[in-house]
Image (cartoon, rainbow, N blue to C red):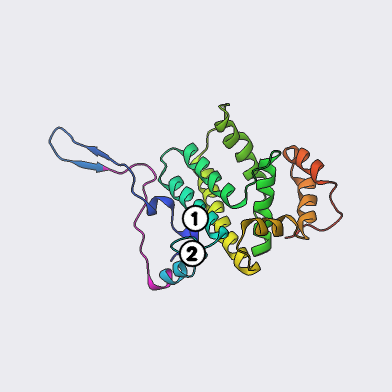
Amino acid sequence: MIEDERSATALQLRFQLGRLAVPEEGVRVWTPPSGDAGTLTLRGEDLDVLQNHPVAQLSREPSDDIERKADVALRWIERSTLATEPLVSLLYLFFALEALLGDRSEGLKGPHLAFRRAMLGHMVTEQFEFPTRTLWLYSDVRSHAVHGASMPEVDQTTLRGFAFDVRLALREYLTLARTLGVTKRSKLLAAIDNHPDRAELIDLLERFGGDRWSDYLAKEGPPTDTTAPG
């Protein structure tokens, strides 16, 4: 049953190349690639989940700024699903996340994006994935790839986890926009950036985030003496 995005892998939702072996006897043998997906069966309750998903409620043609950015993100997510190279897939996923939560201004874009992603999750679900992984992928992989620097390889486990988080971010983005009744991305981002629990996340990163967050936290100001959100 498809209870959430974790239940259907990307490989179950796309075609991919396989290999055909022809032995000397002439018998054709189809060899599936490593990590080949199984079948995906949809039942009635699965369709209900899909139809009630915030993405399924988008207009065929985007009707406002929130939907336009969601449409852009969806297209990048789709491209990432069809990409055969992990690095390319990761870059497309970052393009999707930046379409939702990114900022054109100069400065510490990676920490700002990762921080917003965590705050979005907290505002919608009262929980979030610790944002250091997103910051690491942005700084050491995404930025290095764009600027031609050496970078670590991206394994499938890391890629799948990040892909799930970006899809979840899209759901939470649409959910929060409808909860707040906003149609412009700028107003949604302002609500995220000015949320009263922001200081608590800053405090959490000050204590457990490590050196990667030092410059960003210095810019944001000293942490407050509050209890971090669960």
Disc 2 element: loop
Magenta stretch: give its range.
Answer: 31-46
Amino acid beneath label 1: Asp
Residue at 61 percent across and 39 percent down: it is 138
Residue at 77 percent across and 59 percent down: it is 197
Q: Position of residue 46 (x, y in %)?
A: 42, 69
Residue highlighted by disc 1: 71
Looking at the figure, which quarter contains the C terminus? Answer: bottom right
Please count the marks in the image. Answer: 2
| Tag 1–tag 2 contact (CB < 8 Å) | yes
Q: Residues within 10 Å of mark 2 (few under 14, many from 20)?
A: some
Looking at the figure, which quarter contains the N terminus? Answer: bottom left
Residue highlighted by disc 2: 58
Residue at 45 percent across and 66 percent down: it is 50
Using the numbered discs, state the Cα–Cα distance from disc 1 to disc 2 in whole angstroms: 8 Å
- Compared with 30, 10 (above or below) is below
Residue lying farthest to the top in this orientation = 149
- Compared with 128, 141 (above or below) is above
Please indicate whether residue 102 sits to the left or right of residue 79 in the image: right
Q: Position of residue 101 (x, y in %)?
A: 62, 51
Question: For residue 43, what is the image quadrant?
Answer: bottom left
Depth check: give the residue in front, 174 or 23: 174
Depth check: give the residue in front, 156 or 164: 164
Amino acid beneath label 2: Leu
Disc 1 element: helix
Residue at 69 percent across and 46 percent down: it is 112
Q: Position of residue 129 (x, y in %)?
A: 64, 53
Depth check: give the residue in front, 225 or 110: 110
